[in-house]
Image: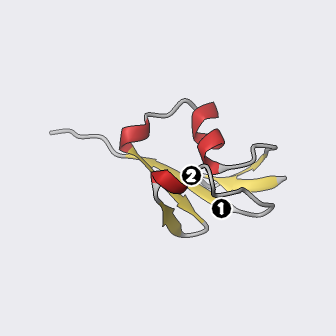
Amino acid sequence: MKIRLNGETVETSIPDILSLVKVRDLDLPSLVVEHNHTIIQQTAWADTLLQEGDTIELLSFVGGG
């Protein structure tokens, strides 16, 4: 299926948000996931299935000075 991931169209067979995050090896504590313009809580990532045409934004927050 094709999804939009951080502004780019990608082809994937990954079934859910948690699997997508794990494959990308991202830092979970600082990560926010937006699925079709809705923020998804980390506790719901495994239950949020990906579908054709979904839009996913993976946002990491970092501190700085």
Q: Residue furthest bottom?
A: 37
Q: Residues within 10 Å of mark 1 (few under 14, many from 20)?
A: many
Residue at screen point 37% across, 40% down: 29
Q: Residues within 10 Å of mark 2 (few under 14, many from 20)?
A: some
For the residues labelled 2 and 1, the Cα–Cα distance comes to 14 Å
Q: How is the image coloured?
A: secondary structure
Residue 45: image tag: 2
Amino acid, disc 2: Trp
Q: Secondary structure at mark 1?
A: strand
Q: Relative to residue 43, is residue 63 depicted above or below?
A: above
Amino acid, disc 1: Thr
Residue occupied by mark 1: 55
* Residue toward you, 8 or 2: 2
Total numbered labels: 2
Residue at screen point 43% across, 34% down: 27
Q: Residue furthest top?
A: 25
Residue 34: image x %, image y %? Answer: 52, 60
* Residue toward you, 47 or 31: 47
Quarter holding the C terminus? top left
Q: Earlier in the sequence, mark 2 or mark 1?
A: 2
Residue 36: image x %, image y %? Answer: 61, 68
Q: Secondary structure at mark 2?
A: loop
Residue 37: image x %, image y %? Answer: 55, 70
Residue 58: image x %, image y %? Answer: 52, 49
